[in-house]
C-alpha cells in the first residue's frame, strides 16, 4: 500500500537546499565530488567542478560527468520524497559547457512510499570493496536494479563467459595503470593527505590487500585498513552501463542510471561496486564494446552482489560541504 503525503508548505528554497545536501552523498570517481550547485529563485543549477577532475585517468571527463549525473539523480530523488516534481534541463547552454543541468521546482506531488524508500537509501548507500558473500543474488533483485538503470540509460548484464573476458580486460587495464607513474601519482593524491579535506579515499575504505577475485578491482596503489577476509566474487553479477554515444550528454544520463540502480540496490540489500579502470584504458574499453557487439559506448562496469554479512561495520567516506552558492556568495 502506498502512503501519500504532501509537504507543500515547505518554502521552495529550503527544499532545494535540502536537495543539494542530499546530492552531496552521491558516489563519485575517487570521491572527488566534481560538482557544485548554484541556488536561484525556484531552481538549482548543477555545474561541473573542473578543479577536481582527474586529468590523467579521466581527461575526457567521462567519469566526472557520470559522477555529476549521480548527484543530479540524488537531488531529484530528494525532491520527489519531499513532495515536489522538478523539471530538468540537461546541458541547457552550449556557451557554458560546465553548466550541466537546471533543476526547477514545479508542482507539489504526493510523495510515495517508494520515493521515501529511495531517499532514505541516500545516506545509507556506500561502496563496499570487500568480496561479496557466498549468497547468490536473487534474480528479482537483478531485474529491479536493471529496470531502475534502464529508466535512464542502457545496461547490459554480462553472461558468465563474458565476465571472464571482462576479468581479463580488467586485469590488463590494472597492469597498464600500475605501470604509469602519472596514474600512480594521481591515485596517491586522492588516497593520501594531499586530497582536499572531505574528499578522496581514506585508508578505512580501501582493502588491506587485493582480493582474490576473478575480476580484479581497481589497484589503488596502496593498501588500506579494510579487512577483506578470504571471500571471492563467484556469486557476483557484473553489468555494464553504456550509452548510445561517448558524449557528455550520454555520460550524464549514465550517472543518473547509476544512482537509480544503486539506490534501488541499497533498498534490496545489494552491494554495488563501480569499476572504472577498465573503462579508462582504451584497449580494455574496446574489449567491452565488442562484448556488447558494438551496440553502444561502454561507460561504467558494476559489480553487484550480496554484501558479506561477517563484517557489517563500515566507515562512510567523508564529504565536502554541500551548500549551494547564491548570487551573493563567493563562487
Ligand atoms: C563514476 C564512478 C567511478 C567509480 N569507480 C570506482 C572504481 O573503479 N573502483 C572503486 O572501488 N570505486 C569506484 N567508485 C566508487 C567511488 O570511489 C565512491 O563512490 C566514492 O569514493 C564515495 O564513496 P561512497 O560510494 O562509499 O559514498 C566509482 C564511483 C563513480 C561514481
Image (cartoon, rainbow, N blue to C red):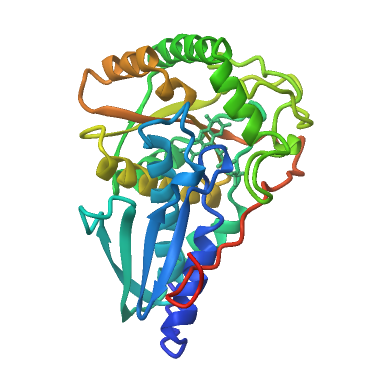
Q: Is residue 276 visible?
A: yes
Residue 173 located left or right of residue 203: left
Q: Quadrant of ligand 1?
A: top right
Q: Nearer the viewer, residue 310 or 165?
A: 165
Q: Does residue 137 lie above or below 125 as drawn?
A: above
Q: Nearer the viewer, residue 248 or 158?
A: 248
Residue 242 located left or right of residue 309: left
Please name the residue shown 41% across and 87% down the image: 8
State which quadrant residue 145 falls in: top left
Q: Position of residue 174 (x, y in %)?
A: 53, 15
Q: Position of residue 224 (x, y in %)?
A: 75, 29
Q: Does residue 97 lie above or below 134 as drawn?
A: below
Q: Position of residue 179 (x, y in %)?
A: 56, 10
Instruction: Report the residue that reaches farthest toward the bottom.
Output: 9
Q: How many labels, in total?
A: 0
Q: Is residue 234 visible?
A: no
Residue 244 located left or right of residue 238: left
Please name the residue shown 66% across and 21% down the image: 221
Q: Nearer the viewer, residue 144 or 173?
A: 173
Residue 315 located left or right of residue 234: right
Please name the residue shown 44% across and 45% down the image: 50
Q: Does residue 315 lie above or below 116 as drawn?
A: above
Q: Nearer the viewer, residue 111 or 325?
A: 325
State which quadrant residue 323 falls in: bottom right
Please name the residue shown 37% across and 49% down the image: 256
> In what quadrant of the picture does the N terminus appear?
bottom left
Q: Position of residue 33 (x, y in %)?
A: 53, 48
Q: Does residue 68 lie above or below 325 as drawn?
A: above
Amino acid at each position: 500500500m502506498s502512503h501519500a503525503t504532501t509537504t507543500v508548505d515547505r518554502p521552495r528554497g529550503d527544499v532545494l537546499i535540502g536537495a543539494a545536501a542530499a546530492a552531496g552523498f552521491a558516489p563519485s570517481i575517487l570521491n572527488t565530488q566534481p560538482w557544485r550547485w548554484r541556488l536561484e529563485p525556484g531552481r538549482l543549477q548543477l555545474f561541473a567542478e573542473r578543479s577536481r577532475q582527474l586529468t590523467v585517468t579521466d581527461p575526457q571527463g567521462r567519469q566526472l560527468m557520470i559522477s555529476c549525473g549521480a548527484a543530479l539523480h540524488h537531488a531529484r530523488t530528494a525532491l520527489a520524497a519531499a513532495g515536489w516534481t522538478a523539471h530538468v534541463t540537461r546541458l541547457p547552454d552550449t556557451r557554458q559547457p560546465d553548466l550541466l543541468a537546471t533543476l526547477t521546482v514545479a508542482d507539489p506531488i504526493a510523495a510515495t512510499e517508494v520515493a521515501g524508500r529511495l531517499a532514505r537509501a541516500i545516506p545509507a548507500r556506500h561502496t563496499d570493496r570487500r568480496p561479496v558473500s557466498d549468497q547468490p543474488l536473487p534474480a528479482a533483485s537483478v531485474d529491479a536494479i536493471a529496470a531502475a538503470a534502464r529508466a535512464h540509460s542502457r545496461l547490459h548484464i554480462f553472461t558468465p563467459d563474458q565476465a571472464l573476458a571482462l576479468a581479463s580486460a580488467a586485469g590488463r587495464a590494472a597492469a597498464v595503470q600500475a605501470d604509469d607513474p602519472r596514474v600512480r601519482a594521481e591515485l596517491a593524491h586522492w588516497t593520501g593527505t594531499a586530497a582536499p579535506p572531505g574528499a578522496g579515499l581514506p585508508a578505512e575504505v580501501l582493502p588491506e590487500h587485493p582480493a582474490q577475485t576473478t575480476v580484479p578491482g581497481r589497484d589503488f596503489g596502496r593498501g588500506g585498513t579494510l579487512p577483506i577476509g578470504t571471500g571471492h566474487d563467484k556469486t557476483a553479477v557484473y553489468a555494464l552501463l553504456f550509452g548510445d554515444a561517448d558524449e557528455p550528454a550520454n555520460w550524464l544520463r549514465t550517472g543518473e542510471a547509476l544512482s537509480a540502480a544503486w539506490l534501488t540496490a541499497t533498498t534490496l540489500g545489494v552491494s554495488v561496486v563501480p569499476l572504472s579502470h577498465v573503462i579508462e584504458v582504451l584497449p580494455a574499453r574496446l574489449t567491452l564494446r565488442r562484448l556488447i557487439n558494438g551496440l553502444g559506448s561502454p561507460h561504467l562496469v558494476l559489480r553487484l552482489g550480496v554484501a558479506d554479512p561477517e563484517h557489517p561495520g563500515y566507515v562512510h567516506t567523508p564529504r565536502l560541504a554541500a551548500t549551494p552558492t547564491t548570487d551573493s556568495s563567493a563562487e
